[in-house]
Amino acid sequence: MLGLGGPYYHDASACLVVDGRIVAFAEEERFSRRKHHKDSRSCAVAAAYCLSEAGITLAEVDEIAIAFNPTWPEPSDTCTDGELIAELLDPALFGHHRPGQVTVIEHHLAHAASAFHPSGFDEAAVLVVDGSGDGISATLAHGTTSGLKVLRQFSFSQSLGWFYETVAEHLGLGDWTSSGKLMGLAGYGNPNRYQLDFLRPQAGGYHLDLSRWGIRPDEQVEDQYTDLRYYRRLKGAYAAAYTDLGIPPRRRARTYTGGRVVPDSGYRPEHADLAASAQHLLEQCLAELAREALTLAGTPRLCIAGGVGLNCSANGRLAALPGLDELFVQPAASDAGCAIGAALEVALRRSDLSLPGEVMTTAALGPAFDPASIRATLNDYGLAFCDHGDDLPTVVAGHLAFGRTVGWFQGRMEAGPRALGRRSILADAHHTRARDHINSRVKHRESWRPLAPVLLEESACDLIGTSVPHPFMIVARQATETARQMIPAAVHTDGTLRPQTVARDDADPYARLLDSFAAQTGRPPALLNTSFNHEAEPIVCTPRDAVATFAAGPLDLLAIGPFLVRKD
């Protein structure tokens, strides 16, 4: 089963499921090198990769599923639009094969399936929240071994995702692709300064009313959805609402320094306070939705997906809800992850998947490159390197202990926007200067943005206060006092961190790196981990991507396969 994600001209992706198991998944941006693969919904290269991983052709795929309804608001189970299918899957990449039809999986159902089907739960409440898709912005569902049942939905005119996005844009943090920055800025502000009373949490969910700025909640706006008229009106209404608070739209100054455009990374207290107020309000609304979903489903387990599901701070708040025993958040929670949900959902319908299915414990589902191909790339660039073989983690740990910053490229590329030890930049989390160096000189981004820690599971209790695995760096935790002292560079100003935990495994170079670092420093097996890219590009995918990003910035070393390249 081949699932295709990212239907709304961003975050295109593909996922191949064989016998109910995810064989491969990748985001198109990693191949096109265009962040979020904006302004295109072609999934062709990602799909071609997935098929190559299984050694099959597109003609051999039993069913192809897309994660949206092209005929919305009219219902549809299949799509036979040849032009649209060719736009998604360029025939030139598949021997000019043109599928006659694809299966339509409603957008929020694909999100929900991406969270519940690989959770390993036999029953769970499911919460999907995003900007919008197929006219819906939030879905509460109940997952059982029979599949998913929708319990309640909220229209696009009640979108929490768009609310959060407009705050980030108003503060000059960027367009919708930069909404995640707001979460970092919120840590510096006072969440009680601004009363955003147009959005009100209430039992069972929330209510949005922008009547004061020209949009009534009872207004019929379905005809303004697909041509984006409502979206444009909404952005104008929100801009007026924030301006009425005394915060005019911010246009950050940009300077040209050292061959790069450098954005102004400063902020005023009112900007941080608005960010904090918006984050707090979002968390309140999500908590009400989660409580309602858990109550309606009658279960203590919760699964989360949708773009808002990438908000680590909010997920941390939900994880602490009374009555919630287990939480699974899809690491590719954005529209890219819909490819996973669409493929798994059609597999379930064809009886190729039984629930509970295989638990998604890793996001390493993308391309890998063998030592021979990596060596060839390094030779092509004329780079000197050392082949350390199985000793590479020990050697790199020594460099990290000495204060160096390392590009780490190992195994299959990870899914989602967070690097998880396959395409990472690593540094010593004991020194805050490492964080500042990465933000300002390596990533060229705002100085106030937090970085995350990776740690061996055995140190989790000491550093994050729980032994529950956190494999995907997507749920924030309160830092312990030990974490504040030992890995301060990974602790945000609000006292939280967003950890990735790694099981001890002698076959995993990432785990051996952490173990060796602890042995050489006498400190916890934890490092600072951020994605291997700079601000303007997606996470690196191929050895050539890694070499280009390594060469373009002040990283000290590149650990790629068994090889180590030194900048000096």
Image (cartoon, rainbow, N blue to C red):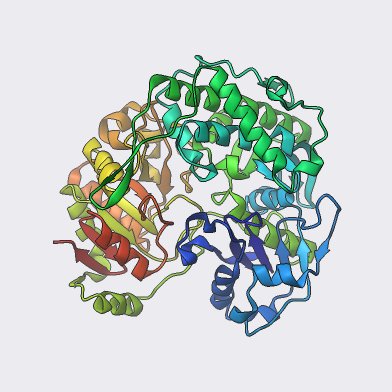
Q: Position of residue 181 (x, y in %)?
A: 45, 37
Identified at 42% across, 41% down, the residue is 499
**Observer-nearest residue: 254 or 192?**
254
Give the farthest residue toward the bottom.
95
Q: Position of residue 439 (x, y in %)?
A: 30, 42
The image quadrant of residue 189 is top left
**Observer-nearest residue: 307 or 247?**
247
Count of residue discs: 0
Identified at 39% across, 68% down, the residue is 542
Q: Quadrant of the C terminus?
A: bottom left
Give the farthest residue toward the left.
568
Q: Quadrant of the N terminus?
A: bottom right
Q: Is residue 20 left or right of residue 29?
A: right
Using the rendered image of the protein, determine whether residue 161 is visible from the camera's viewpoint: yes
Q: Position of residue 296 (x, y in %)?
A: 78, 33
Identified at 22% across, 59% down, the residue is 557
Q: Is residue 472 left or right of residue 306?
A: left
Q: Is residue 38 above or below residue 383?
A: above
Using the rendered image of the protein, determine whether residue 18 is visible from the camera's viewpoint: no
**Observer-nearest residue: 281 or 237?**
237
Q: Is residue 174 left or right of residue 481?
A: right
Q: Is residue 310 left or right of residue 504?
A: right
Identified at 68% across, 72% down, the residue is 86
Q: Position of residue 104 (x, y in %)?
A: 77, 60
The image quadrant of residue 509 is bottom left
Q: Is residue 347 above or below residue 145?
A: below
